[in-house]
Image: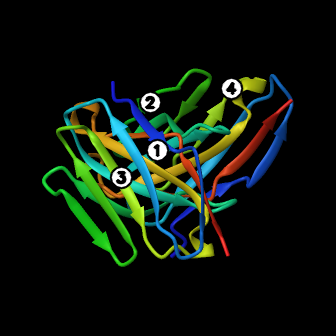
Amino acid sequence: GENVEQHPSTLSVQEGDSAVIKCTYSDSASNYFPWYKQELGKGPQLIIDIRSNVGEKKDQRIAVTLNKTAKHFSLHITETQPEDSAVYFCAAISNTNAGKSTFGDGTTLTVKP
Amino acid sequence: IAGITQAPTSQILAAGRRMTLRCTQDMRHNAMYWYRQDLGLGLRLIHYSNTAGTTGKGEVPDGYSVSRANTDDFPLTLASAVPSQTSVYFCASSAQAGEGETQYFGPGTRLLVL
């Protein structure tokens, strides 16, 4: 089945700096890659996603890139703010797995004011 | 619109006891999911339901059962709780099953089995 690895497990940046989180996946049939943000005591919320026919997608300060050949995708947050502090999860979905999501282990991002 | 609600918010349970975690969504989503989240690990799928009346096993189904009698409700039952089932449990739903469907998560149930 699908295996998703996420790095780093923890990331600390200064306010205003950029943050990058990387994920690799194993199933070449995976074709949908969402990113979730989980704040303390809450459930994960989708923040951005990308499909396999697109190499990059941007939404204000957040962007995601996908390299299908290398089977990795990354989350980029620019001009970080303290409210960006949270746990971020990547996921990969393949229709060969009945569309079920496989999640990475999460990255705890801390933005220092 | 409430989205997805879960109950209870938290629970301390003696080992061997039976427990049902409740999940209700008001978005008329066809697909629903149960995940567990353990410290340092991502979300692992326990069971899922693509539509009312059907259920399927996820990555870690042992010790858990689910039912989907209607569209809105998807309860998760621990027949005889064990300490290894101490975790945070999240229910989620999506409009349809399959790739590209955004999953919406509930606030979670924190379960401690002693």
Q: Viewer-nearest of labels 4 and 2?
A: 2
Rendering quarter of residue A55? bottom left
Numbered disc 3: what chain?
A: A
Discs 2 and 3 carry the same chain letter: no
- Dot 4 crowding, Cα within 10 Å, few <14, some 14–19, many 20+: some
Q: Is residue A13 left or right of residue B110?
A: left
- Disc 4 or 1, which lies upstream in sequence? 1
Tell me which amino acid carries mark 1: Tyr
Which residue in the structure is indicated by mark 3?
A: A74
Numbered disc 4: what chain?
A: B
Q: Element under label 4?
A: loop
Asked if marks 3 and 1 touch (Cβ < 8 Å), the reply is no
Q: Viewer-nearest of labels 2 and 3?
A: 3
Tell me which amino acid carries mark 2: Gly
Find the distance from the CA under tag 4 to the CA under tag 1: 18 Å
Q: Viewer-nearest of labels 4 and 1?
A: 1
Rendering quarter of residue A87? bottom right
Q: Element under label 2?
A: loop
- Disc 1 or 2, which lies upstream in sequence? 1
Find the distance from the CA under tag 3 to the CA under tag 4: 40 Å
Q: Quadrant of the C terminus of chain B?
A: top right
Which residue in the structure is indicated by mark 4?
A: B79
Q: Nearer the viewer, residue A112 or A68?
A: A112
Q: Nearer the viewer, residue B86 or B96?
A: B86
Tell me which amino acid carries mark 4: Ala
Which residue in the structure is indicated by mark 2?
A: B58
Which residue occupies 29% across, 70% down? A58
Which residue in the structure is indicated by mark 1?
A: B33
